Amino acid sequence: SFGSSYYSDFMLCPQYHHYAWDARLESLQDKLSLVKGTAIHAALNAWYRSIGSTYEERQDAAVEALMKVIDESTIVEKADLYDALTTVFLEYTIKYGNIEKDFDIVRSEVESEIIINGARFTFRIDQLVQMNSRKLYYVMDTKTTSSKSFAQMYADVQNGIQYPGYVYGASRITGTDVFGVITNGVRMLKNENQFDRDFSAITKDRLQEFEE
């Protein structure tokens, strides 16, 4: 079975796709950018999954998830990375702490596969949420970068296969009409961290194209 990364890696670089998916070659050293992104993902997943607990309990759960990713990596300077990413996470929660009260978590960390025209498609989404003020359901995802602008990062995912796949899969397995994707954008720059949030509607035409 194939997921969105399989196809997006091929579109990004066929040679990389061959080494990663066909030859199954793995690096002996974890990429710092990948560890950063994975750690922030883990922290925010724990943060949203624990909605309903106290702020301190949610913060502790998120930081613990972040530390686990760093500890299990091959990165040497773990303490510096931990301090830097904890700062990123805390700045994020300060910016969006009040806005998130508009969300109800429907499903958390959904991993499944569906059959589309005889082919297996696997996918994993961070959160499926209901935004109460809009009465709409969204997949919530996190994207991290240290180089792209937010506009470029959003354009890349909106024009690719990943987001239609998320919405299509989430709708199929939950029986809910999922409207689109909320992207938590995190830019980790040398001298500052930047945060943004984007709401992307996935039209029925895009879902039809994905299915075909």
Image (cartoon, grey):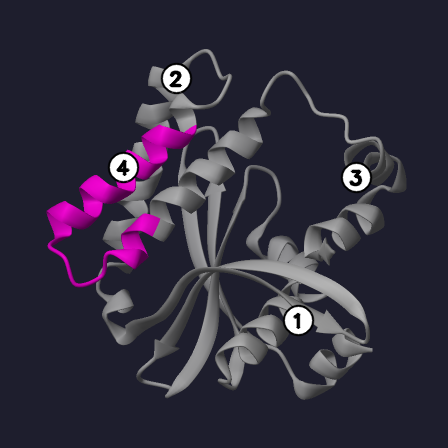
- Figure label count: 4
Sequence-first disc among 3 and 2: 3
Image coords of residue 106 (percent x, y): 36, 73
The tag on residue 176 is none
Q: Which residue is mark 3?
A: 21
Q: At 66% from the left edge and 66% from the top edge, which residue is drawn?
A: 158
Q: In the rendered image, which residue does mark 1 sit on?
A: 164
Above or below 150: residue 70: above
* Between discs 3 and 1, the one toward the N terminus: 3
Dot 2: element: helix
Amino acid type at mark 1:
Pro
- Rendering quarter of residue 90: top left
Q: Residues within 10 Å of mark 3 (few under 14, many from 20)?
A: some
Please state which amino acid type lies under the numbered disc 2: Lys
Residue 56 colored in magenta in the image: yes
Which residues fall within the magenta stretch? 46-69
Sequence-first tag of 4 and 2: 4
